[in-house]
């Protein structure tokens, strides 16, 4: 801060912002931390991660980061159709916006989408400045970082152009994390607390109270080495990622337990779009369900049934590159006899299979373009250049989350959320492939800008007060596996009213217990099921088998919820 000049002040006060606690170290958290420091070298950043710094959902991202960027470094970004700065014959920012809105099934927020897609070229440049090296050349993975080399661009489902930038062929997340973690480690102003679970957002008043203004976040309570401690901060940024552990099959790591949504809910923040959970169509059907990137279908691989017949054109004119929710449903309906059967059959794998046939791409291309997947399939004794490999849809990304504006501000002063945990509305009912890394970069940057500028006005979101305790009284303990099976059977890809009612009843009977992560999962499950039961018609990733047809016209806007608090001044 320049001596003698007043610095930015905290939201609603005249005190300067000095210290932020960033919770979570995926691309959104890392980017937020780095930009906070770049904008204000005096700003202290505490980066809290519940595992090791490099472990996050981001690390497992393969396909890439969607971005319309110039063909060569130094060019201006592609602009709107008709804008000479762009290259409309090949791609444009407007086309990226249109694809994102279409994927969102009429529920994506056009302002947030424009912010995301227009911020992509700058975001990519910022990543490159931070040390990220994208693949160059036609098929990628050449590692040529020369300033004039063209970035390689992959294609993924529901994109009207090849615009997916990648790293190491199919190791984009790992490449991003390596570069950003190195930058974080090199910055003495960022204190990293690993193996530290945040258990509470500290507030200066009771959550939900409106007496004397809404309470503001003043720091976090954190658990490390069996001890809890309180850490003060002027701004708390949730960047905790998603909640794939809600379901039996997930591409997310074991730490994806919905912590940020649970923390924000208990702090009285508004949440939204919780019924929309994206299942990736193709995880390898082996324990742990590692992702098989959509980029493989983008290069020409096909989904086939037990007879070897490619079936996706039965479901959508775009076939294997249909929107992600359509492909996931098509596979799930074929696998239904096995996925919802008795647990022994689920685990022994008896029943129908769907396979991904990449054999036509050839061994040399597969090894060059998808080196990590070639190694992964080989580790499981599979040669994907010779035989189709078994796949199953897996919980991948939660479109819903903590409601924020496009600067990451939540409804609680001093509390911000960025990346998957946040719901800016940018994804609507279904996220477009490879928009999630972009989301972390663009909104992480904007959040850091807002914090260093003093926070800004707290947004107001309309929300329904929800009293979850009204659902019933907890009578039994539960294991994570019980919850995952219940959620997969009744609140996963295919849903019915009866199934959701049953799930709601069971979840209400589960006691949260003493493990904070299990308690967070249970809370997220209850919120998701509540929101899903409230949306009677199918939309995007929320599919009601009993009322499959989307209502004509614009879909019903999503509901937002806030925790009902007794005694709060209305
Ligand atoms: C993939 O590589 O298929 C995942 C990309 C994404 O989740 O957007």
Image: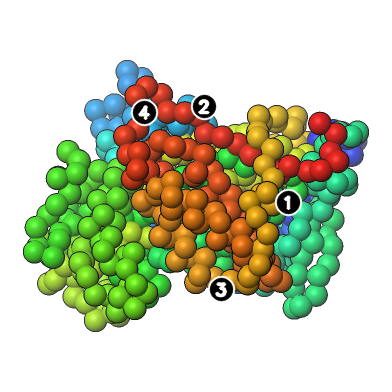
- Check the picture and name the quadrant holding the C terminus: top right
| Above or below, 426 relative to 157 | above
Numbered circles on residues, count: 4
Residue found at x 13% / y 65%: 306
Residue found at x 17% / y 38%: 317
Along the line of sight, which residue is nearer the eye, 495 or 365?
495
Disc 1 from disc 3: Cα separation: 22 Å
Tag 2 residue = 111
Q: Quadrant of residue 455?
A: top right
Along the line of sight, which residue is nearer the eye, 520 or 477?
477
Nearest to the eye among marks 1 and 2: give it: 1
Choose the circle earlier in sequence order: 1 or 3: 1
Tag 4 residue = 551
Task: From the viewer's perspective, tell me whether residue 5 is left or right of residue 55.
Answer: right
**Tags 1 and 3 in contact by the CB under 8 Å rule?**
no
Nearest to the eye among marks 4 and 2: give it: 4
Give the structural element (helix, strand or loop) at label 1.
helix
Task: From the viewer's perspective, tell me whether residue 481 is left or right of residue 342.
Answer: right
Disc 1 from disc 4: Cα separation: 34 Å
Give the structural element (helix, strand or loop) at label 2.
helix
| Above or below, 209 relative to 363 | above
Residue found at x 58% / y 53%: 526
Observer able to see residue 263: yes
Along the line of sight, which residue is nearer the eye, 159 or 336?
336
Disc 4 from disc 3: Cα separation: 38 Å
| Above or below, 100 relative to 325 | above
Choose the circle earlier in sequence order: 4 or 3: 3
Q: Residues within 10 Å of mark 2 (few under 14, many from 20)?
A: few
């Amino acid at each position: 801060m320049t001596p003698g000049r007043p610095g930015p002040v905290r939201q609603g006060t005249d005190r300067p912002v000095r210290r932020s606690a960033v919770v979570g170290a995926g691309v959104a958290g890392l980017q937020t931390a780095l930009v906070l420091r770049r904008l204000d070298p005096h700003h202290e950043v505490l980066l809290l991660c519940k595992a090791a710094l490099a472990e996050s959902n981001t690390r497992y991202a393969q396909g890439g980061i969607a971005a319309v960027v110039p063909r060569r470094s130094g060019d201006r970004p592609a602009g709107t159709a008709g804008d000479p700065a762009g290259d409309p014959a090949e791609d444009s920012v407007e086309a990226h916006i249109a694809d994102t809105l279409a994927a969102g099934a009429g529920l994506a927020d056009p302002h947030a989408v424009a912010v995301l897609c227009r911020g992509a070229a700058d975001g990519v440049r910022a990543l490159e400045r931070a040390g990220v090296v994208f693949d160059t050349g036609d098929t990628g993975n050449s590692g040529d970082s020369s300033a004039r080399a063209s970035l390689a661009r992959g294609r993924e489902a529901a994109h009207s152009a090849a615009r997916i930038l990648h790293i190491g062929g199919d190791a984009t997340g790992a490449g991003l994390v390596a570069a950003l973690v190195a930058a974080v480690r090199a910055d003495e102003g960022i204190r990293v607390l690993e193996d530290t679970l945040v258990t509470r957002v500290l507030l200066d008043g009771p959550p939900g109270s409106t007496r004397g203004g809404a309470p503001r976040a003043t720091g976090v309570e954190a658990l490390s080495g069996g001890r809890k401690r309180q850490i003060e901060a002027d701004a708390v940024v949730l960047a905790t990622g998603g909640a794939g552990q809600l379901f039996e099959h997930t591409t997310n790591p074991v730490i994806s337990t919905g912590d940020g949504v649970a923390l924000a809910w208990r702090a009285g923040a508004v949440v939204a779009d919780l019924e929309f959970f994206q299942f990736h169509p193709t995880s390898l059907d082996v324990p742990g369900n590692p992702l098989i990137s959509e980029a493989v279908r983008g290069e020409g691989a096909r989904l086939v049934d037990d007879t070897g017949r490619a079936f996706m054109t039965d479901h959508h004119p775009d076939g294997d590159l249909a929107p992600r929710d359509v492909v996931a449903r098509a596979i799930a309906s074929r696998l239904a006899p096995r996925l919802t059967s008795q647990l022994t059959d689920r685990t022994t794998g008896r029943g129908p299979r769907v396979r991904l046939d990449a054999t036509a791409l050839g061994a040399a291309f597969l090894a060059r373009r998808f080196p990590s997947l070639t190694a992964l399939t080989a580790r499981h004794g599979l040669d994907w250049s010779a035989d189709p490999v078994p796949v199953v849809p897996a919980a991948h990304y939660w479109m819903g989350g903590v409601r924020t504006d496009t600067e990451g501000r939540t409804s609680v002063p001093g509390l911000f959320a960025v990346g998957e945990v946040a719901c800016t509305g940018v994804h609507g009912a279904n996220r477009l492939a490879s928009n999630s890394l972009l989301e972390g970069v663009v909104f992480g940057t904007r959040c850091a800008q807002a914090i260093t500028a003093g926070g800004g006005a707290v947004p107001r979101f309309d929300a329904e007060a929800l009293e979850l305790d009204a659902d019933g009284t907890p009578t039994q303990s539960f294991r994570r596996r019980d919850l995952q099976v219940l959620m997969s059977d009744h609140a996963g890809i295919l849903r019915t009213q009866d199934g959701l009612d049953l799930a709601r009843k069971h979840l209400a009977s589960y006691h949260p217990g003493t493990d904070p992560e299990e308690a967070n999962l249970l809370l997220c499950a209850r919120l998701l099921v509540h929101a899903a039961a409230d949306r009677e018609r199918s939309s995007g990733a929320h599919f009601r088998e009993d009322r499959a047809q989307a209502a004509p016209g614009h879909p019903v806007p999503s509901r937002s919820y806030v925790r009902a608090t007794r005694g709060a001044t209305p």
